[in-house]
Amino acid sequence: MLSLMAIESIIALIDAEIARLKEVRALLSTTSSVATRIAAPKAKKAKAAAAPKTRKKRRPLSPEARKRIAEAQRKRWAAQKAKSK
């Protein structure tokens, strides 16, 4: 088991880490307005990149069309296989 001395040193390390995190949080909160202005253009780019994905809806293929496409692809594969022999 951990001795009392080890537990106290662990608690001291945790307290030091908490104090450091509080300082970092304070620094970030005072510069949040600057960070927001810098991050805003990136957010626009992310929205612009996501827009084309949702803009166009795919049209479904009929089973007959899928069959024609599959047969045409098999025909291309067979021609390629025959050519390579």
Image (cartoon, helix red, strand yellow):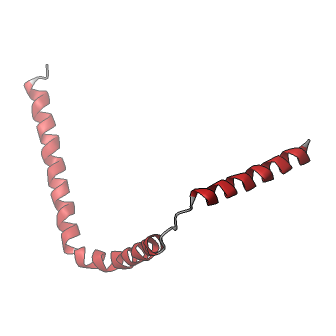
Q: Is residue 5 left or right of residue 71?
A: left
Rendered residue at 13%/19% (across/down):
1
Residue 75 position in % (x across, y down): 79, 51
Rendered residue at 39%/74% (across/down):
47
Q: Is residue 71 left or right of residue 10?
A: right
In-front residue for pair 51/72: 72
Q: Is residue 53 left or right of residue 6?
A: right
In-front residue for pair 33/55: 55
Quadrant of res 81: top right
Give the total number of marks visible in the rendering.
Answer: 0
Q: Is residue 63 left or right of residue 25?
A: right
Quadrant of res 85: top right
Residue 69 against residue 11 in the figure, above or below: below
Rendered residue at 19%/70% (across/down):
29
Quadrant of res 61: bottom right
Residue 72 against residue 53 in the figure, above or below: above
**Residue positioned most to the front:** 64
**Residue positioned most to the top:** 1
**Residue positioned most to the left:** 4
Residue 40 position in % (x across, y down): 34, 78
In-front residue for pair 35/73: 73
Rendered residue at 19%/74% (across/down):
30
